[in-house]
Image: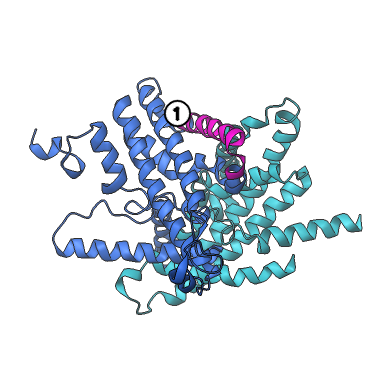
Amino acid sequence: MSADVKTGALGFKKDTPAERFFNGLIAENPTLVLMIGMCPTLAVTSSAINGLGMGLATTFVLSLSNAVIAALRKVIPGTVRIPSFIVVIASFVTLVQLLMQAYVPALNSALGVYIPLIVVNCIIFGRAEAYASKHGIVPSFFDGIGMGIGFTCAITIIGLIREFIGAGTAFDVQILGEGTVVPGPVGAFLAGYHPISIFVQQAGAFFVLAFLIAIMNKVKSNLEKKGKDTSKFQQGCCSSEEEKAADKIIAEKEEKEAE
Amino acid sequence: MGATILNLVGLMISASLVNNVVLSQFLGLCPFLGVSKKTDTAIGMGGACVFVITLASLVCSIIYKFILNPLDLSYLQTIVFILVIAMLVQFVEMILKKYIVSLYRALGVYLPLITTNCAVLGVALNNVTDGYSILESTICGFATAVGFTIAIVILAGLREKMEYNDIPAPFKGMPLVLLTSGLMAIAFTGFSALK
């Protein structure tokens, strides 16, 4: 085996816990690099705390479902693997939902229907299919942790940007605008800020994500100019599947019309 | 009776326009962004969604009312609903293929894409949270899907117009679509006055 088969992301030895962790956090960050799981990314990022809560709930489900699916990978027959994965994932989602109802009811009601919708988050299903069903329990568990923390960091940052511009707060602490916690002349200066409330509304989510993807596109084209491998960069896993299917349908229709 | 019908009309307007499933609740974004290149495919996707979401809301609310709720198993709703929806889509596809071929030709290709659409599960779960009756759930499901169709057809029309526009390279593709959706979301907030 050549050296590059054994080394994984960022020069770590392949499939070790540390390599999996940093792979999910940086090299294959699900939100910023792979661009998957866009529904929760847009929906719950109206504040940093919501993003953090959603991210941690997803990390919990992702790491444990990865471990269980890896443990059962030799038992589950290939033909029924999708329903089996769904049952495993849905069980953990129910677990996290009950735990959140019991211990953090405020966060649970803020996140609402998006907690049970972790079931259909394509990050979780994608990792089960692409990684956990082919690797051992320990690397799969750490793959889940890495991917989950990567997702958490990304949506917490998006939440922070939206919250800061839209309401002048960071983690619910008023920094900009009226009632700022910063004392003295700096505080007086900051208090003059008028929050752009569109950023905490629905439209702001679309705008922030659009600019984020545009920045990633720029990064990607710069890397390409330097001759680096950018094959990992994608746009919308779940929507790209559907985009491919839609392109196929359009092509077929055009063929028929040409005939 | 008159009051009930008025209630249902209000429910339809609220579910389709005011709380638009894509632009205000962010459910079903994947097909919204993925299948909105051409108006034809957008209409097909919308039609398939109307069909599946209405049926799924009906079936899920029946299951909740007659099985999960009486047996005190409502904490199992997520698992049960997702499996029921996955089965339902397969089942509908088989029935259409065999008995209603014309409808299958129009919608068939879109059906497998909807299985893991979060809008279907989201509507079913929301119906339970809001405590809707079976009739209300079905109407709400139908109206939500109509709202989805309206949004995706408008977006597809806009994308067709913008296809050859000269825009900065990093904004080509997904960012432009997201910016357009954002502007549509602003326009749709105008409907909140209808509440």
Q: Residue at x 48, y 33 (%)?
A: A89
Q: How many numbered marks have been drawn onto this rendered protein structure?
A: 1
Judge whether A258 appears above or below A23 on screen. Answer: below
Nearest the viewer among A75 and A212 is A212
Q: Residue at x 70, y 30 (%)?
A: B68
Residue at the farthest left position: A2
Nearest the viewer among B40 and B13 is B13
Residue A134 visible from this viewpoint: no
Chain B, chosen colour in render: cyan
Judge whether A10 appears above or below A188 on screen. Answer: above
Say which residue label 1 marks.
A80
Q: Is B119 positioned to the left or the right of A250 in the image?
A: right
The quarter in which the C terminus of chain A is drawn is bottom left
Instruction: Give residue A113's quadrant in the image.
Output: top right
Q: Is B73 positioned to the left or the right of A165 in the image?
A: right
Q: Give x and y (percent) for residue A247.
A: 40, 59
Q: Main secondary structure of the magenta part?
A: helix
**Of the residues shown, which amino acid type is indicated by label 1?**
Val
Q: Secondary structure at mark 1?
A: helix
Chain A, chosen colour in render: blue
Residue A253 lies in the magenta-colored region: no
Q: Give x and y (percent) for residue B8.
A: 80, 56
Q: Give x and y (percent) for residue B124.
A: 65, 44
Q: Residue at x 74, y 68 (%)?
A: B194
What span is colored magenta in the figure?
Answer: A84-107
Residue at the farthest right position: B1
